Image (cartoon, rainbow, N blue to C red):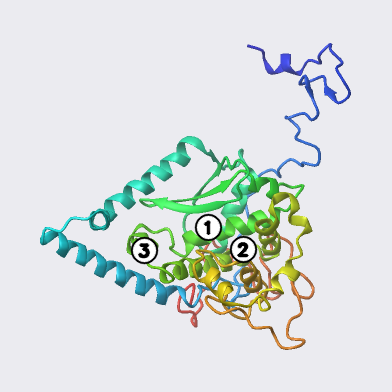
Amino acid sequence: MQSDDQWAQPSAHTGPPGWNPVTGMAGWDPRVGPPGWAPQQPYSPPPTPTYQPTRGLSPFGLPARHSWEIPLLVIVIIATALAYLLCVALLLFGYFDQYVVLLILAPLLLWFGRGVNYSTQRLNAVKMSPTQFPEGFRMVEEAAARFGMAKVPDAYVLLGNGAINAFASGHGFRRYVVVYSDLFEVGGAARDPDALAFIIGHEVGHIAAGHVSYWRQLGMFLVPFLPLLGDALIRAQEYTADNHGYCNRPQGAPGAMKVLAGGKYLNALVDFDEMADRAPREKGFFIWVVNAVSSHPVLTWRMWALRDRSRHGRMFLRPNPPPPQAYSGYPPAGGYPPPGQYGEVPGLPRDPGSYGEYPAQPESRGPYG
């Protein structure tokens, strides 16, 4: 087996044009990266977030929970509890059905599924750390600090094979984020790291908002069997997570949406404002149907919600056009502050405490109040 020094010796074979004498390959050196790719930034601990007064859906302070989320969650939990009691009664009367058994075993099935999913990442995925995907690891720490989380969730990079996706989950008291590897082609230093920071903030936001809790997911076990209602709850949660992503890195919202619209290669050709402007113009019954049965906000409405931070994203009815001169474009005049400064407001002191230890806010009813 050859040592690193042996591999580093130039090959005597000159090869065709583009031949690399170090690696014996045509094209680029894998130790350096393909043309146009810049190495990831070395790890550096994120700064302590500055305390900001909460201003609705703005990037200042803690993010807002979507106004529809809790009412829909209460309805779904009640429906799930009633269905569970009905299944217990049916079993007592001797009625057996696959759906009855499925719901009765829901606590065990959910626990088992979450454990398998977590173990899959621990065995197959690359765990972010100061030495592996250090910039992504820093973004996770930054998001957790911004949301006042007592513990930074684990983060993994999973082979995407071209898919653009990320998700958050948990098992027991452990919480984690999984980012597909193809997103790092978007988040590399040569592309759009702000977009990756928004996506990571979105996923960490799911954890901060309690969306991955075992008991919450057990109460939502009936969601796949509740047409319209179940999808609406998931959409509201996605809007909430978008608020977290926007709070974490507002300037990354357009880039993240452009990746979802055009992919990681054509994202630069997508005009965020032009696509968002279509949200109030696209009308019709089937427009309503497609949104109503979607588990995520449809993309034009989602872009509109990320651009118009004066109100929550629309759930069932398309957005209304703003009055003339009411909208000044995205981003706001003057732009956003550089990443890491968290939109500091002059005159507000930086909190000297550790992550999440903000000064008391008497008028606040909680992080989402």
Residue linked to disc 2? 248
Give the CA separation, mark 3 to mark 1: 27 Å
59 or 96: which is nearer to us? 96
- Residue found at the very far bottom of the displayed protein: 323
**Badge 3 amino acid:** Phe
Residue linked to disc 1? 204
Report the side of 152 relative to 30 (left or right): left
Q: Secondary structure at mark 2?
A: helix
Instruction: Categorize mark 3 by other alpha carbons within 10 Å: few (<14), some (14-19), many (20+).
Output: few
**Badge 2 amino acid:** Asn
Give the CA separation, mark 2 to mark 3: 34 Å
287 or 201: which is nearer to us? 287
Residue linked to disc 3? 225
Give the CA separation, mark 2 to mark 1: 10 Å
Q: Quadrant of residue 63?
A: bottom right
Is residue 288 depicted above or below 113 in this figure?
A: below
Residue 151 lies, in percent from the top left, at 47, 54
Instruction: Categorize mark 2 by other alpha carbons within 10 Å: few (<14), some (14-19), many (20+).
Output: many
Q: Secondary structure at mark 1?
A: helix
Residue 10 lies, in percent from the top left, at 81, 16
Residue 268 lies, in percent from the top left, at 77, 56
Q: Are marks 2 and 1 in contact (CB under 8 Å)?
A: yes
The structure residue drawn at horizontal position 44% and vertical position 62%, both measured from the top left corner, is 211
Residue 311 lies, in percent from the top left, at 59, 80
